[in-house]
Image: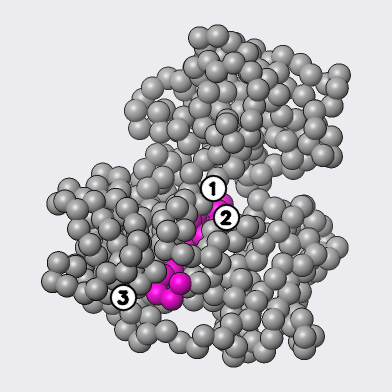
Amino acid sequence: MDSITDTNEVERHDVVVIGGGPAGLAAALGARRAGAADVLLIERDKNLGGILNQCVHDGFGLFLYNESISGPEYAERLAEDAVKESVRCETGAMALDLSPDGVLRVNSRSGYRLIRASAVVLAMGCRERTREMIEIPGTRPAGIFTAGSAQNLVNLQNIRIGTNAVILGSGDIGLIMARRLVFEGIRVSGVFEIMPWPNGLERNVRQCLMDFGIPLELSHTVIEVKGRDRVESVTVAAVDEGFAPVPGTEREVPCDTLLLSVGLIPENELSKRAGVELSPLTGGAVVDETLMTSVPGIFSCGNVLHIHDVADFASHEGFEAGAHAARFAMEGPGSGEKFRIVPGANIRYVLPQLVRPGTTQFELNFRVTRPVRVCRVSVRGRASGKTYFHKKYRRLLPSELQRIIIRPAVEDEMEIECHE
């Protein structure tokens, strides 16, 4: 999008938040509480809350509100706080484009318009991987759903999606839907995960599968879908270390429904249009310790930045991003020099990936590449050898995001490692 000069036709705001889910609502609140006088939140759906609205199970709010509430209740509390604190929330509004200098093209119920923001917070969330993305062979019958779309149909539209289901993948939404289908009287024949460990939270494996006698088969995948008008069965097989099906392990599992819970992808098309640098490890933006992207004044948080396993953590990140966006809008950019933070042994990714020299007391997020027991996590300067963090852990899992605090002043590029 070409840069636009300021005219009376351009609407202006201090901070604009794109996305009204748990991260976006928190970002808008964080911006207001940090002193931004004019905060606009735009959400393309007709309601605020994002994916929370279809998550009717409890388990939300344990960190933010110190109690276990449902997704809709969690969304309602955040939305009520946003209204009370004078955040302008506009639903049914789609951000079509974003320029590097903070100009948005927005189509909404009030029509098409241009908005210039002193700072922008990206909180667009994520989308699910589909059958086409993982290339499952076979016919193309009805009865194949992503776990999130099935959740929407069952919880919001009261639609019975089948009678006998198989779930491919052990992401948290798939695990939760396994239990939900049982509640709806739908048999779940099994959950098949291609990795040798579950990809969802341990508590969801226990509460959603083990407590209901639903089998979880690791190192297995669906290699074929059968059926003409409706799914009739799937063929599953064990996989080797290279994830290739093992000959002779194939078996047919009768079912009329296949749910896919095979990963989430940050929704970064708008970020790309703004010229934001993306990480091949997270699929989200490369950010510094303030959650600012490579484009000054554009911040990112929540599932559009990296996939979270707990909504409260996405909100926590949103509060931080909003507060930093407000400070940017009021004070302008700080120092341009930044050091890299890189993942080392047994670390899948680290976030933020950049930090300003001299920074103290900032949060670092990381995931391990595989389950590890009795391990040590260390963060050290690559040139200086300075120890910024060191801690022993009894166990770390890829499905659980870890958050640590770095307190010493940053002097050089840093590397995080995990050793058993």
- The quadrant of the image that shows the N terminus is bottom left
Q: Can residue 274 be seen in this view?
A: yes
Q: Position of residue 212 (x, y in %)?
A: 62, 28
Taking 284 as reference, is 215 above or below it? above
Q: Which of marks 2 and 1 is nearer the N terminus?
A: 1
The image quarter containing residue 8 is bottom left
Q: Where is residue 170 in the image (x, y as percent from the top left)?
A: 64, 38
Identity of the residue drawn at 64% across and 18% down: 138
Q: Mark 1 points at which residue?
A: 265
Q: Mark 3 points at which residue?
A: 118
How far separated are the C-alphas under marks 2 and 3? Answer: 25 Å
Per the image, is 316 magenta? Answer: no
Q: Is residue 140 left or right of residue 18?
A: right
The colour mode here is one colour
Q: Name the residue under label 2.
A: 283
Identity of the residue drawn at 66% across and 51% down: 399
Per the image, is 300 magenta? Answer: yes
How far separated are the C-alphas under marks 3 and 1? Answer: 28 Å
- The residues colored magenta run 295-312
Q: Where is residue 75 in the image (x, y as percent from the top left)?
A: 35, 51
Mark 1 is on which residue type? Ile
Dot 1: what SS?
Answer: strand
Asked if the residue at tag 1 contacts the one at tag 2, i.e. Cβ–Cβ closer than 8 Å, the answer is yes
Taking 33 as reference, is 236 above or below it? above
Dot 3: what SS?
Answer: strand
Residue, far front: 2
Q: Can residue 185 be seen in this view?
A: no
Q: In this view, does 259 lie to the left or right of 7?
A: right
